Image (tube, rainbow, N blue to C red):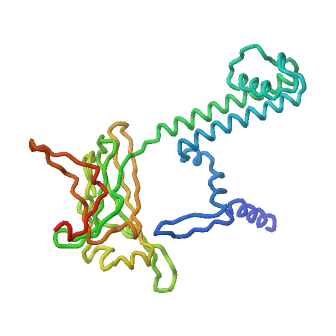
Amino acid sequence: MKRRAKKLQTKRREHYIPHVHIKVKDGQLQVDGAGAWYSYWRDPYHLLLTLPWSGFLAFIVLSYVAINSLFALLYLAGGECIANARPGSFLDAFFFSVETIASIGYGAMYPKTDYANTIVTIEAMVSLVGIAVLTGLAFARFSRPTARVMFSHVAVIVPHEGTPALIFRAANQRRNQILEAQLRVYFVRDETRADGQFMRRIYDIRLLRDQSPSFMLSWLAVHPIDESSPLYGITAESLIQTNATIVISLSGIDETVAQVVHARHTYTASEIVWNSQFVDIIRHTADGHRYIDYNYFHDVLPLELTE
């Protein structure tokens, strides 16, 4: 029993992430501390998939230089084991490693001892594994479906057909079609239960239209704030006090790649504007045609200026 308890305790320590602090800032959850980076490095595959392309390319370059530098030092440790290389030259050993790991084989430099041949064999195996891993990561990053959906910088609360309403808008930046598009909206805020326990509660928000057979240009999302709405009776001050956020999730099928794509956006309390409405983005030409002017997509005007 003691051995089993000790084993379970060791297992718990292995999964323990130290120094992780979760806090709410402007209504958004943030994870701080060394443990956050510790958890990222425990899942390197996910980390390399989620890195921006600049970081991914920097990782490849640094890894390539580091691996070749390591093998260059191993070649130097074997003395004059590379034919036609300058004695003690790190550059010659480094570039010989580059030729070996890339299977170039110019023939000007080649291994001349059993020690060098052993290091070359190990480097060739590392090269095969490295190329396979890099190819898989690159394919996974390129094949991952993404949506380029733009959301308005702010959401507004304004009377709509006689009822206050939360309104925001979205636009498909690719100008292709997202088929069977769906919008899901959630209201998240801090609450204290009757027993005094703190919790961050999530409410579903109903839209007048939460589905579209084809989302190609823009989408004006409207949520009536009536007695059945979780936003009923809220004020700008209460949104700030409860660290409230509006979370939007859009999903659909990209017609180009025929795969499901997702987009997500969050509005904090400071990004919800009261008693203002969006500037109309539909314009009319002299010959009677209509077009959408995205230059005004994020613009809002106070109600008194629109009346």
As drawn, 181 above or below 32: above
| Along the viewing direction, whichever of 117 and 111 lies nearer the viewer | 111
Q: Quadrant of residue 222?
A: bottom left
Residue 120 image position (x, y, % from top left): 78, 24
Q: Nearer the viewer, residue 212 or 74?
A: 74
123 vs 31, left or right, is: right
- The quarter of the picture where residue 258 lies is top left
Q: Is residue 254 above or below residue 87?
A: below
Residue drawn at x 74%, y 25% as measured from the top left: 95
Q: Residue furthest right?
A: 79
Q: Residue furthest left?
A: 287
Q: Nearer the viewer, residue 12 or 136?
A: 136
In the image, taking residue 120 as reference, residue 33 lies left or right, namely: left
Nearer-the-camera pick, 29 or 208? 29
Q: Tell me where residue 201 appears, x and y as whole percent.
A: 44, 73
Place of residue 28 in the rendered image (x, y in percent of width and height, measured from the top left) = 48, 66
Q: Residue furthest front?
A: 305
